[in-house]
Image (cartoon, rainbow, N blue to C red):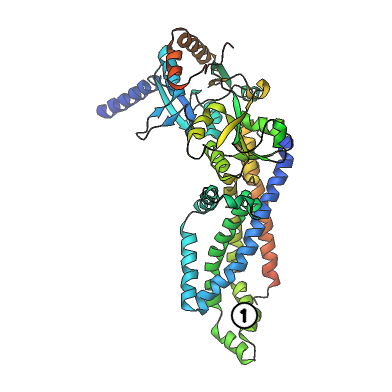
Amino acid sequence: MKIIKSIIAAAVLSAAAMSTAQAELRLGLDSAPYEPFYARTAGGEWKGFEIEVGEALCKAMNEECVWVPIAWDGIIPALTSNKIDAIVASMSITEERMKTIDFSNKYYNTPAALIAPKASEIKSLDDLKGKTVGVQVSTTHANFAEAKIPGATVKTYQDFNEHNQDLFAGRVDAIVADSLALEPFLKSKEGEGMEVKLTLKDEAIFGLGVGAGVRKADTELKDKFNKAIAQILEDGTYDEIAKKYFAFDIYGGAN
Amino acid sequence: MGEWYWLPDYGWRFVEGIWVTLELLGIALFFGFLLAIPIGLVQVTGPRWLGAIARGYCTMIRGTPLLIQLWLLYYGLGSLFPYFPELRNSFIWPILREAFPYAAFAFILSVAAYEGHIMRGAFASVPKGELEAARAMGMGRFTVLRRIWLPRAIQNVLPTLAGEAVLTLKSVPLASTITIFDVFGVGGIVRQETYRIYEPLIFVGFIYLLITAVLVVLFRWLENRVPSANRA
């Protein structure tokens, strides 16, 4: 009897120990690669600008962090239902999202771009009348295309790489997406015939840049993120990482 | 019971989504069944080689996921287009550009295989004596098929075909992976824009339930119209 009791006691104790030891911060990102921000190597490790920034932030916050890949459309629900603690996945800070979750200050900000085949004559949004524009579902780019491109058909894709493929195939005439995320595609064999036609600015739609998404109740974590962001900006860690990936100011200037 | 404030905003898109679902389902079932008749028949009547091709076709389609077939058709073919630039000026380019024809085609192929398999059994199950009697009455081969064999075969498998139709309905959401937004796809948009999970899913599920109910009633009506030899 005694033995059983002590086994139970040990089990209870270790369970309690485990739950307190769960100090790991779970950072959610999109399970599909989004280069150069995050992508998996053949060895299964996460690499990219955002990964390095995220890890620098964790170091500054003094937290152990793990990356948790989640399908893009389930990433906010994963946060609100406590499956992850923060979203570090190139998510733009928008009012619509602020209804459900909260964000830290931005840690980068890149313009949206419209790309199309080099041969096509697109000089303004009006030239897209009667054309088909590809976007990824539930992105600020999709909202922009729906609202600001008059007379164009918007074709909505589940995945970033799929609309690139269909631009190559010729099924869409143009794509609206993040200028930086498009860069690897423009350098690839499929994308070499494409170019950036327009750089798009619209603060109301594209938001204030990319921040870490946190639960609304989690103001403590939000403050920690803000402090960490300020810290790595100040001590040069951020610039050091940014220099490795981009030839320009990825932070996008003062807020 | 949840939050439904979003429903009026998306009402019209759901109507469009339901229409897309019904359109794809209708096309798939109609043309799929038309193809299923010869696919089933040649497996029973021969010629042998044609029967083997039909059987091989059924095995191949039934043995691979519909999602893979859909993607092979849409993205697979699409990746070849740039190597044939003359395609873009041809008259079929407007069709090749759209996603809908690929989805319709993939669903037709799938229904043809599943129902072709059913029709093979259906044709085989009609008693030989009936067909011989019809021949003895002086009917030609085609008339026997049209007036006796096919109606008797369909009569036997109508409940099975009804089941297939319901299963096909529930395959249609796959189309949303190639940019066609059926009811399920619209539900996905709501989910992603409002960050509500359960309500859109429950709503979409309810719509499928309704469409299924309509299908079941429709097939029951058909079954009642066809006089059954097995019914007193």
Residue B219 or residue A245, whichever sits in front: A245
Is B117 rendered above or below residue B210? Answer: below
Say left or right for A82 vs A202. left
Q: Position of residue A76 (x, y in %)?
A: 55, 28
Residue B170 in view here: no
Is B224 rendered above or below residue A46? Answer: below
Q: Quadrant of residue B142?
A: bottom right
Q: What SS does tag 1 mark?
A: helix
Q: Quadrant of residue A160?
A: top right
Report the residue at 58% width, 85% height from top. Answer: B131
Q: Position of residue B200 (x, y in %)?
A: 64, 38
* Residue matched to label 1: B145
Residue A200 in view here: yes
Q: Quadrant of the N terminus of chain A?
A: top left
Q: Position of residue A247 (x, y in %)?
A: 48, 19
Q: Amino acid at mark 1?
A: Leu
Query: What is the chain identity of the residue bearing mark 1?
Result: B
Q: Position of residue B12 (x, y in %)?
A: 74, 41
